[in-house]
Amino acid sequence: MKKRLPLLFVLFTVAIDAVGIGLIIPVMPDLLIEVGDGTLTNAAAWGGILSSVFAVMQFVCGPTIGSLSDRYGRRPVLLVSLFFMSLDYLIMGFAHAIWLLLLGRIIGGITAATAATAAAFVSDISTPDEKAQNFGLIGAAFGIGFILGPVLGAAFAELGTRGPFFAAAALSMCNLALGYFVLPETVTDDIRRPFSWKRANPVGGFYHIARLPGLGTLISALFIYQLAILVYPSVWSYYSVERFDWGPRMIGISIACYGVMIALVQGGLIRLCLKFLGERGTIRTGMLFTAIGCLGFGIIDQSFAVFVLIPISALGAVFTPAIHGIMARTALANQQGELQGVIASVNSIAYVFSPLLMTQVFNAFVSPETDYYLPGAPFLVAMVLVLVCAAILRSQKLVK
């Protein structure tokens, strides 16, 4: 029980974090059109820029925050991050100019340590054999948050484009208050590691982590996979408006359905996959279903097909906890925060390039000047990236 209660609280924290993110997705196109006084294609381009700015700051600061959590503990890092996350939502809620939205994304990116520090916390309290399945629980908690977030976002959107941002800020502040009284510390003197600026940066952190057996290749493969999978948050709102003429309500419902499936896959099915297929077999399975899902979204033209493809693509969610489990077992106990910081930085690089790539591909294939109208083109690009990821892992014999 002493082990389960901290795990449940951290999972709750991740779920609340996801609710806050999911709240704002359905209104982002309308907000960017309102603030920028532009068109849907311009809004998509600005959406990519905002996501990339957030990711750049997370890339630069991720290893620093991970190293700080190895030195000073998970608790203070999580609480400070939640405070600035609330501030980010408030700035975006009051923003009436693009530069204020950029400021909010900068602040949010610097302190976006919640997921990485939560993963380090889970690694601290897990045995080696439990790491992959417990990382799956983090994904499931995030999925549950997305079940509620977009639905609530669509409801708050009825009050205006600002409503979801203020709701997200309130949720973050409530979570901060709860964490202050409940969150325990898991970094003990036995695993506490001195802070060093030489390692608390993307280059230094990656150098020390990549020296461990196989981690350099695994991190490279994870980066390629993230480039692919981020097609969903990068273009889903714009893709569904363009292809199916959906409004915030249907966008929210579709994301919530995806969240349900992610929660089921990472909260339950991942355990069966790990038991019968092992970590490497689970990685192969995840890449296969991700590629099939991307291909489907790339070519469909009927809205009902979205809800056929959602469970198929969600099966690909077994990939991330499986590869994270291998990496966490390879790293030392006093490197878990550093490892998660490096993973956060690698993911952030993907967040920099994927939104820019996917939104530009989307714009190119829906522009009135295009000769090849194909709103699903970004998903076909994502499928190719998944195949590249599979080739990298196969060439190093990490996945047969």
Image (spheres, helix red, strand yellow):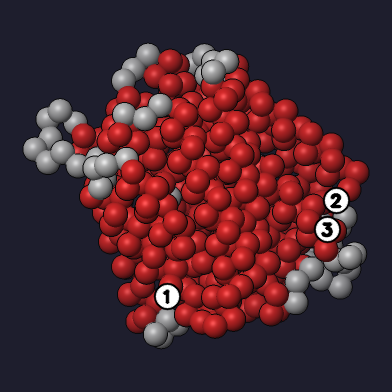
Position of the N terminus by quadrant: bottom right
Up the image or down, 203 lies above or below 214; here it is above
Looking at the image, which residue is at 40% across and 48% down? 307
Mark 3–mark 2 contact, CB under 8 Å?
yes
Quadrant occupied by the C terminus? bottom left
Where does the image place residue 33, in percent across and percent down from the top left?
39, 19
Task: Identify the secondary structure beneath mark 2.
Answer: loop
Q: Amino acid at mark 1?
A: Arg
Q: Which residue is mark 1?
A: 284
Q: Give the mark, 2 or 1, whose residue is nearer the N terminus.
A: 2
Which residue type does callout 3 highlight? Pro
Give the label on residue 389, or none.
none
Q: How many marks?
A: 3
Circles 2 and 1 in contact, beta carbons < 8 Å: no
Residue at image position (65%, 30%) is 168
- Residue with the mark numbered 2: 183
Find disc 3 in the rendering and name its residue.
Answer: 6
Name the image quarter holding residue 128.
bottom right
Q: Nearer the viewer, mark 3 or mark 2?
A: 3
Residue 26, position as x, y percentages in the image: 48, 30
Dot 1 crowding, Cα within 10 Å, few <14, some 14–19, many 20+:
many
Please tell me which residue lies in front, 346 or 298. Answer: 298
State whether residue 31 appears in this view.
Answer: yes
Residue at x 67%, y 35% (from the top left corner)? 85
Give whichever of discs 3 and 1 has the lower sequence position: 3
